[in-house]
Image (cartoon, grey):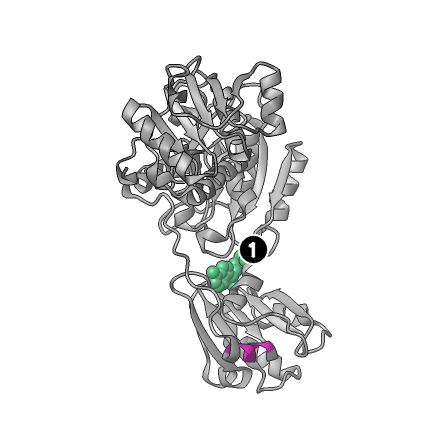
Amino acid sequence: MSAQHDLPLFVDLEAKPVLVVGGGVVAERKINSLLESGAIVTVVAPEITGHIRNLEQSNALIWVTREFEVLDLQLAKFWLAITATGVADVDNLVVALCEDDQIWCVNCASGQTSSAVFAAQGKTADGIQIAVSGNRDPKRAVAVRDAILYELDLGLIDPGPQRGQALGSDTAHISPSADKTGTVTLVGDGPGDPELITLRGLARIRQADVVVVDRLAPQALWTRLPLGIEIVKVGKEPGKHSVSQDEINEIIVDRALKGQQVVRIKGGDSFVLGRGGEEVQACVTAGIPVEVVPGITSSIAVPAAAGIPVTHRGVTSSFIMASAHDGAKSVLSAIGNTPSEATLVLLMGAGRLTEICQALIEVGYSPTTPLGVVEAGLTPDQNVTISTLQEVAQNGLKPGNPSVVVIGEVVRMRTELGDLSPASTYSGFLNSEHIDSRESATSRANFDVASS
Ligand SMILES: C[S@@+](CC[C@H](N)C(=O)[O-])C[C@H]1O[C@@H](n2cnc3c(N)ncnc32)[C@H](O)[C@@H]1O
């Protein structure tokens, strides 16, 4: 009996006689499933579990109180037999007799000798039935079944609307009912690797009517969105109208007031130099329910990926994260009187790094303080440069965007730890058809923004 040629089949056992040989816990589990399917169950076993006994006493099944006998297959016109005696000779005999009589037989002790096998099965609250075959390896089947149920539960897999509830998948997400309350959810999608979004963040995105994204949102994430979710891009793009923060606030509030479930995707964490607070303020002012799903911030995760912990016992127990957008002035005002043992993490500092290093030396930082620059962290293009304040102050350094700059003794840890996070191997639902359809939805959305 070859597993490779198994035919996955759902069969109707309602009112069909089924024989179960054996009365232990394995048999008990199968009996429960059979009774749920409406089968008429006959159990042949000298002893049975308390649960099977209760079933027998409530007339849910027939119990023949003895060892299996060859003629037992004639007790009724059985469609299926299950053998779970724990005695190989008996199980094999049942299998052989069933084969002769053309009765499907599940040998619970050996998938290889069975002419039928149970799938690992489960059901969601709204009745979706999952059945997985593990090529006769029940443990693998159970693992896959559990993973699918888990993802369905979290909303990571979208089974689509139930038949009769919506016209089709393309319209299901974009037609909010008039009385539906709109919401806004800010989701931080991490520093660039599509695997680094949280489960909750992904679930919210999948339940959205519309997602509003910046240029920084990982492209691969889009391919995970069910068709029918509208994408509105609000990041700066060459040759296109750039959308101001006020306009972004207006877009998300306006969509929510129309009853849509709006998800605003932001790079890293929405509240770390992400202007998420302003968007929440706009929603609160408009009386819109708003939720924030935290994201993994690049300020900690990107150094970590390069083997630089922002704190390390015996080196430093504090770090300062600052925007270097306005150059040395903003960095110096952020560090104030903080001791220079604290690690300094600079975001948006790529363009003015030389000037910043000079200023730090001038305010008393040791010129030999190590400095690490991590460009495009946690992406396949991650690039790490290690230097010192003095070297950069004298020779200059112009890393690409985006980059996180780390200044402090912890940078030396990289020598010992090395790169700690491989680029994602996630491919998800990546296929050209999916990407094409997402991109055409995006173009449509851009047109909407420009004309609004
Ligand atoms: C406007 S800030 C947004 C930060 C974001 N909210 C966060 O929590 O990571 C953008 C800056 O984040 C840093 N950044 C974001 N992603 C990065 C990455 N993958 N590699 C290096 N730096 C990154 C860069 O310093 C970039 O200039």
Q: Amino acid at mark 1?
A: Ile
Q: Position of residue 9 (x, y in %)?
A: 34, 26
Residue 108 lies left or right of residue 54; in this view the side is left
Under 8 Å from ligand 1: the CB of mark 1?
Answer: yes
Q: Main secondary structure of the magenta part?
A: helix
Q: Nearer the viewer, residue 182 or 167?
A: 167
Q: Image point 59% across, 72% down: which residue?
A: 328
Q: Is residue 337 magenta?
A: no
Residue 10 lies left or right of residue 256; in this view the side is left
Q: Image point 52% across, 79% down: which residue?
A: 416
Question: Which residue in the protein does label 1 denote?
Answer: 296
Q: Toward which corner of the image does residue 8 lie, by quadrant?
A: top left
Q: Nearer the viewer, residue 312 or 17?
A: 17
* Range shown magenta: 410-414
Tell me: residue 376, above or below residue 285: below
* Residue 132 visible in the shown view: no
Q: Nearer the viewer, residue 377 or 8?
A: 8
